[in-house]
């Protein structure tokens, strides 16, 4: 929420294309903010403008450890902060020791520490328009991207220590490794200069790029704010900068196994930065920052009222050895549901514990039922059997 200088909320919808920006102040009346107009004739179903002092755990989780990328680089929650209503992600040349779940399964000392956030298990949608207003980092890789909600995310404790559960998965449906889970890159800055040309990318199930687009006009993406967006529909995915479409993938142009990961599949948001290539660690720069003013999601075009879930489904049964953990991927209908937030319940948390976001932990030998619950209290049940390891 933003306010005028008298402390009154500003909620008027402005023309998205070319209208002057509204000027606003924070709650204290002393921090001038520049808040962009909302997209006209579209239903806003999610917004985080980072107005709180801390990251909203209902929306985001910080990445921890060597979750992707190069062996010398890891994510750390301390490199994610909110400053004056802006999310700031920092990459530093510094050493830090954390547990590496894959491939070493041991503690590793990293030479570069960066940050990232993701909405998986907390906020996810199937179709709509996804936008972020950002300043990208100089020299490093900044990205606003998406994976299918079925992505097999690694798990490391938020303090960087080893989890007390096996890295293995057992008996789980609807879970996919990269890139079969589907990856959409709305924006990645790969040119490592002040006038970088962000690229967008779509990946096949074999981990190869289907095709990528580069914005045709050179932009100052480091010193100037720009709005990066994708529109995901049942027939295509399109990428935009500042409201101008610069690339489109139409599903009918690709084989069925490629589009399987995208059509009717929920996606989650990831925002983060890193080093693109090992040679770039020697460029002389020792720190860089990426700035995110806000993130918004609009309902698919033509939907003017909130769409509530009418059903939720998870697999009927699951068997896990004690000490194992996995992730449960819910399917919510209709696909245009405005808020797919899910909470989890367990009849006996001493046998099976379910963490926020859908992580399932087998605590002790026994049987119990767990439930996925939508915001409007529709439930789906899974019977879990925990066996001796």
Image (tube, rainbow, N blue to C red):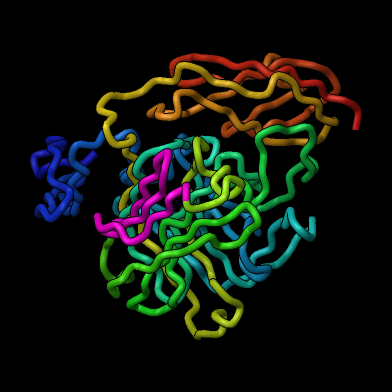
Q: Tell me what residue is drawn at x 41 percent, y 38 percent.
A: 127
Q: In the rendered view of the protein, which quadrant contains the N terminus? A: top left
206 vs 84, nearest the viewer? 206
Which residues are drawn in magenta? 227-252
Is 203 left, or right, of 50 in this rendering?
right
Q: Is residue 94 or residue 385 the one in the foreground?
A: 385
The residue lying at 54 percent from left, 46 percent from top is 259
Residue 60, horizontal then vertical, whole percent:
48, 42
For residue 40, say whether it is visible: yes
Picture coordinates of residue 292, whole percent (x, y): 35, 56
In the figure, 286 relative to 315: above or below? below
Determine which quarter of the picture holds residue 96.
bottom right
* Residue at the spot 50% in from the left edge and 35% down from the top edge: 264
Image quadrant for the C terminus? top right
| Residue 238 lies in the magenta-colored region | yes
Task: Using residue 36 as the reference point, say whether residue 56 is left or right of it.
Answer: right
Residue 50 in view here:
no
Is 371 or 228 nearer to us in this picture? 228
Q: Is residue 308 above or below residue 122?
A: above
Q: Position of residue 27 (x, y in %)?
A: 20, 41
In this rendering, would 19 be left or right of 288? left
Q: Residue at x 49, y 21 (%)?
A: 374
Image coordinates for residue 149, horizontal then vertical, percent: 56, 40
262 is within the stretch colored magenta: no
| Helix, strand or loop for the magenta stretch, by majority | strand
Q: How many marks?
A: 0
Residue that lies at the very extreme toward the right in this rendered image:
388
* Frontmost residue, 282 versus 173: 173
């Amino acid at each position: 929420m933003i306010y005028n200088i008298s402390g009154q909320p500003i909620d008027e919808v402005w023309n998205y294309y070319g209208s002057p920006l509204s000027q606003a102040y924070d709650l204290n009346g002393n921090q001038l903010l520049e808040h962009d107009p909302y997209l006209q004739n579209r239903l806003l179903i999610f917004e985080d403008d980072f107005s709180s002092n801390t990251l909203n755990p209902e929306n985001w989780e910080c990445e921890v450890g060597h979750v992707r990328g190069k062996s010398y680089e890891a994510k750390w929650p301390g490199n994610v902060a909110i400053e004056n209503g802006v999310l700031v992600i920092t990459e530093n040349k510094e050493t830090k020791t954390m547990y590496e779940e894959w491939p070493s399964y041991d503690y590793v000392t990293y030479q570069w520490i960066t940050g990232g956030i993701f909405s998986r298990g907390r906020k996810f949608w199937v179709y709509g328009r996804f936008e972020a207003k950002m300043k990208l980092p100089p020299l490093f890789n900044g990205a606003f991207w998406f994976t299918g909600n079925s992505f097999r995310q690694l798990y490391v404790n938020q303090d960087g220590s080893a989890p007390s559960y096996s890295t293995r998965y057992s008996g789980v449906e609807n879970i996919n490794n990269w890139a079969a889970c589907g990856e959409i890159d709305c924006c990645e800055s790969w040119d490592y200069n002040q006038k970088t040309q962000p690229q967008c990318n779509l990946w096949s199930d074999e981990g190869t790029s289907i095709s990528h687009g580069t914005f045709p006009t050179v932009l100052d993406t480091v010193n100037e704010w720009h709005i990066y967006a994708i529109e995901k529909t049942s027939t295509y995915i399109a990428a935009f900068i500042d409201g101008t479409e610069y690339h489109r993938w139409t599903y009918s142009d690709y084989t069925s196994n490629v589009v399987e990961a995208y059509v009717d599949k929920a996606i989650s948001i990831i925002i983060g930065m890193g080093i693109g290539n090992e040679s770039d660690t020697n460029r002389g720069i020792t720190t860089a920052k990426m700035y995110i003013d806000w993130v918004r999601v609009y309902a698919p075009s033509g939907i003017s009222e909130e769409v509530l879930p009418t059903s939720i489904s998870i697999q009927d049964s699951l068997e896990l050895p004690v000490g194992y953990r996995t992730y449960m991927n819910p399917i919510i209908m209709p696909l245009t549901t405005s808020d797919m937030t899910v909470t989890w319940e367990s009849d006996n948390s001493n046998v099976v514990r379910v963490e926020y976001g859908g992580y399932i932990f087998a605590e002790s030998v026994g049987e119990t039922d767990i439930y996925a619950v939508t915001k409007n209290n529709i439930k789906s049940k899974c019977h879990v059997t925990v066996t001796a390891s």
